[in-house]
Amino acid sequence: MARINKDIFASVFFIFFSITMFFASNSIIKLTVSRIGADFAPKLVAVGIFILGIFYLITSIKKQKQMNNLADTKTSEKESSTEEKKKISPLSVLLTVGLLVLYVVLMPTIGFLITTAVYLFFQMYLLAAKVERKIPLFVIISVVTSVTVYYLFKSVFYLMLPAGILG
C-alpha cells in the first residue's frame, strides 16, 4: 500500500515538473530564424514527461483500487511480497554503465546508426529476463529504432548525427 502511494506522489511530481520545465523553456533565447529553435528539445522532453506522468498516475490509481478490493485476500499479500523482493542486480547496473560509456566513446568513430543499433541490442538483452530473451526481436527493434531516429533527426529536424565509418 505504501508503494502505491509513493507511485501516486511520484507521478504527480513528474506532472508538475514537466509543466514547470515546459514554461521555463520559453525563456531560452532563439538564435535562429527557423521554427525549431533551442527551446524545441526541452519542450519535447517536457511533453513526454507529462504524458508518461499521466499514464503513471492512472496506473497507480488502478493498482490502488485493486489493492483496496483485494486487501482481505491472501493472494494480494503474496503478490505484493514477491513484487517487493525483486531487486536490481549490481552487475546489471555496472554493465549498463559500461555499455553507456562504450556508446559515447565509440559513436564518433563508428557512427550513430551502427553504435545505436548495437547498444540497443545489448541493453535489451541485458535487461530482459532469461526466459524472455528473443534475439530476432531485439535485432529488429534495434535496427528500426536506430534508422527511424537517424531519419527523424536528419530529414525532419535537419540536425547532423555522427556518420562514422558510413561516411
Image (tube, rainbow, N blue to C red):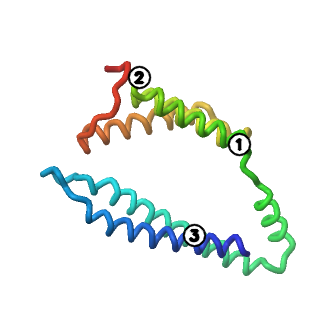
Single out the residue that lies furthest toward the right: 74
Q: Which amino acid does label 2 sit on?
A: Thr
Q: Mark 2 points at which residue?
A: 109
Quarter of the picture holding the N terminus: bottom right
- Spatial CA distance of label 1 from label 3 is 26 Å
* 90 or 69, nearer to the observer: 90
The vertical placement of 38 against 69, above or below, is above
N-term-proximal mark, 2 vs 3: 3
Which label sits in the foreground, 1 or 3?
Answer: 3
Closest to the camera, between mark 2 and mark 1, is: 2
Q: Which of marks 2 and 1 is nearer the N terminus?
A: 2
Q: Quadrant of the C terminus?
A: top left
Q: In this view, does 88 lie to the left or right of 21?
A: right
Image point 61% across, 39% down: which residue? 96
Left/right of residue 130 with respect to residue 139 in the rendered view:
right
Q: Mark 1 points at which residue?
A: 129
Callout 3 crowding tier (Cα within 10 Å): few <14, some 14–19, many ≥20: some
Q: Identify the residue at horizontal 81%, vertical 60% (top origin).
A: 82
Q: Secondary structure under badge 3? A: helix
Rendered residue at 26%/53% (across/down):
38
Tell me where residue 30 appears, x and y as whole percent.
19, 56
* Vertical relation: 61 (above or below) 162: below
> Amino acid type of disc 3?
Ala
In this figure, which residue is indicated by the disc labeled 3?
Answer: 10
Above or below 61: residue 143 = above
Percent x, y of residue 93: 66, 43
Q: Are marks 2 and 1 in contact (CB under 8 Å)?
A: no
Residue 40, image x, y percentages = 28, 55
